[in-house]
Amino acid sequence: MPTPETLLKSVFGFDAFRPGQEEIVSAIEAGRNVLAIMPTGGGKSLCYQLPALAREGVTLVVSPLIALMRDQVAGLREAGVEAGALTSANTPQDNERIFEAIDRGALKLLYLAPERLASSRQLLARLPISLLAIDEAHCVSQWGHDFRPDYLRIGELRAALGNVQTAAFTATADEETRAEILRRLFDHDDAPLTDDVGGGGEDPAAPAVFLRGFDRPNLYLAFEAKASPRKQLMDFVLPRKGRSGIVYAGSRNKCEVLATALRAEGLDALPYHAGLDAETRSHTQDRFSREDGMVICATVAFGMGVDKPDIRFVAHADLPKSVESYYQEIGRAGRDGAPADTFTLYGVEDIKLRRLQIDESQAPEERKRADHQRLNALLALAEAPGCRRQTLLAYFGEARPQPCGNCDLCRKPPELFDGAVAAQKALSAIYRTGERFGVEHVVDVLLGKPNERGERLGHDRLSVFGIGKEFDRNAWRAILRQLLALGLAAVDGQTGGWRLTEDARPVLRGEKGLQLRKDALKARGAAKDDRRPAPAALVDEADEPLLAALKSLRRRLAEAQNAPAYIVFNDRSLIDMATKKPRTMDELATCHGVGAAKLARYGAEFLEVLTGAPAPEAHPTRIRAAAAGTGEVFDALHAAQLRLARGAQGTDKLLTCTNSTLSKVVERRPDSLEALAEVPGMGPQRAERFGPAFLSILAAAAEA
Ligand SMILES: Nc1ncnc2c1ncn2[C@@H]1O[C@H](COP(=O)(O)OP(=O)(O)OP(=O)(O)O)[C@@H](O)[C@H]1O
Ligand SMILES: [Mg+2]
Ligand SMILES: [Zn+2]
């Protein structure tokens, strides 16, 4: 059986594993049960698809959404892998294809919705199932909002399949969810995180737990405090016209308003939220996945089930609910690995609203406390004084020694100032007014602006009244926000009243200094600055026409088979082609995402666009060799066998090798005449005639 490394290139066309993938695949190859937590778009699917291809039997994949399964199956089939999905939406033809593949023993992956588990018991019992993969495994957890009761049956299924090896995947990183997955799927209370596979595995049945690969280096990270939010958002989105993107907004109404505003600017934008009927929503989602360059203005209801790889930007018009949600939502951008931009707006009102939502939820107290903590972590990220990626990865437990160079704060490090005195003034104002007023009232007091309520309560006679005239209203808001983010002040979700925390004391007493961000204090409107980059350039300007031509070929091929554009090749592949400009099948095969099946199916047409001339006909075995990176060896063997067809003198009996024999020689790389003779189609006669030449070609190739 081929190894996962070779399959990575030959089937999927990828040059290297992404962070975390290799260890997870090795653990599965070593027979371990696995729970892997990787971020959205981190590449979890490959972690079970490669082992599935590298072993005998069928890998059963439990996945929660029909749309997700369909996409995966389409992608796999396009890569030449026999896969199918058993869902309630299947036609009799769909099922026939699956059963036929099962009978041939060809089916490698079978996707199944959890609802089908019980009814498919009999079928499953007859299948040679060698691995059970659980995608979106957080669906077993009551903690998450994606909880699916049917996921609880997976345990029974596992038992019925004789506790078959199981690998579970999720992007949800919090500890409660992780513990619950372990308990429900593996009957294990807790398993420590696995630092290196093999080590520490006293109990081989215990699942290996990986929390990996949280970095998504191609995502540009940026936050801005709201000053004139609509304008800020438009300034970010409009220059990205023609690219696929998502704008997340806090309310249904806002989604509608933003979509209308974008359409007025000539963008192809549509709203998506739970208030729209199911048909409209599914139509919108469908168009978004298939087409290039649409913008969806959505509530968080949009996202799960979207694994469009070429989303080029995600903007948050309002603050998300936690670091986890933030990362999951921006993580939908740039899954193909090509550059993508993200942009998050936040303001004091958002923070208040989020607090209120947490406090008013039905969750138990401990859960609410945890949710407030999560929100605090997000605020700290929003107000971070240095590299956002470092702050973000630290939250997920990944240390990163160097600033990333791909976030707003790396692009232009913020100026800091000694904020001790300002903090003392603000904290005193909160304290003296009784720790129950909202931000605007506190700022009124600092600025010495009388208001009716304040006068009634005598706030205009306090020592803090008017002590903050050196800053304007906007600056004080920014200072208060930073105090909140630093955890020196807290806001009551219900009343919006600010109070001090324990950590405020040393600052108030002047025992502890603090640095605040100066840029945040600038007047309204000035927030727009050069931190916000131009849309990430995908190719050199000179190559843009070529990229456009490749995209239009892609669109034509996709439309012909009524499939999303990225099923043919994703953006990253086209960008790679436009940059490398391959002239031959061999060169084309080195481009990102070009595996054997796609090379055979689309190679000639793309080469024609790339070279401007019809591509020469190539034999299928030769194309496979190109995909495997062995085209040149193949050609050398081919030339040698033509040269020696009548022996070295040209007088012997005619002997030839078929292309398929040659490709087996390339694959097996025999290192002796005996081994060469063993290759099917060779035999002793051919080994004698061609052996010395072939062996020296193979040896030279091995050295190169
Ligand atoms: N080693 C790799 N090299 C290049 N691209 C890769 C690699 N592994 C995966 N990808 C690509 O990354 C994208 C995201 O992968 P995948 O769908 O598996 O993400 P995921 O972790 O399942 O995310 P989600 O949580 O959203 O389901 C896909 O387009 C996939 O083809
Ligand atoms: Mg996935
Ligand atoms: Zn950075």
Image: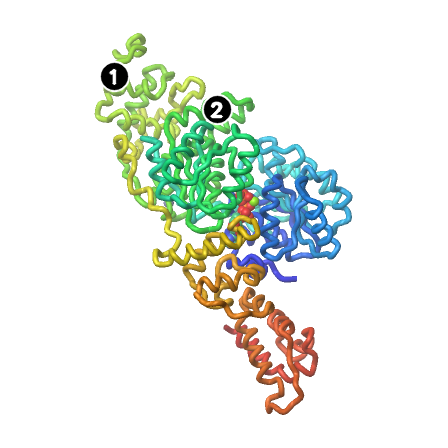
Q: Residue furthest top?
A: 456
Q: Secondary structure at mark 2?
A: helix
Q: Which mark is residue 449?
A: 1
Q: Residue at x 60, y 67 (%)?
A: 620
Residue 223 is situated, as x and y percent measured from the top left of the image, at 37, 37
Describe residue 588's horizontal placement relative to residue 119 as left or right. left
Viewer-nearest residue: 253 or 453: 253
Q: Secondary structure at mark 1?
A: loop
Q: Indicate the quadrant of ligand 3 in the picture.
A: top left
Residue 178 is situated, as x and y percent measured from the top left of the image, at 58, 38
Q: Amino acid at mark 2?
A: Gln
Q: Are marks 1 and 2 in contact (CB under 8 Å)?
A: no
Q: Is 674 above or below relative to 440? A: below
Q: How is the image coloured?
A: rainbow
Mark 2: give few (<14), some (14-19) or many (20+) Cα within 10 Å. Answer: some
Describe residue 210's horizontal placement relative to residue 333 as left or right. right
Residue 176 is situated, as x and y percent measured from the top left of the image, at 57, 34
Residue, disc 2:
357
How many marks are shown on the rendered structure?
2
- Position of the N terminus by quadrant: bottom right
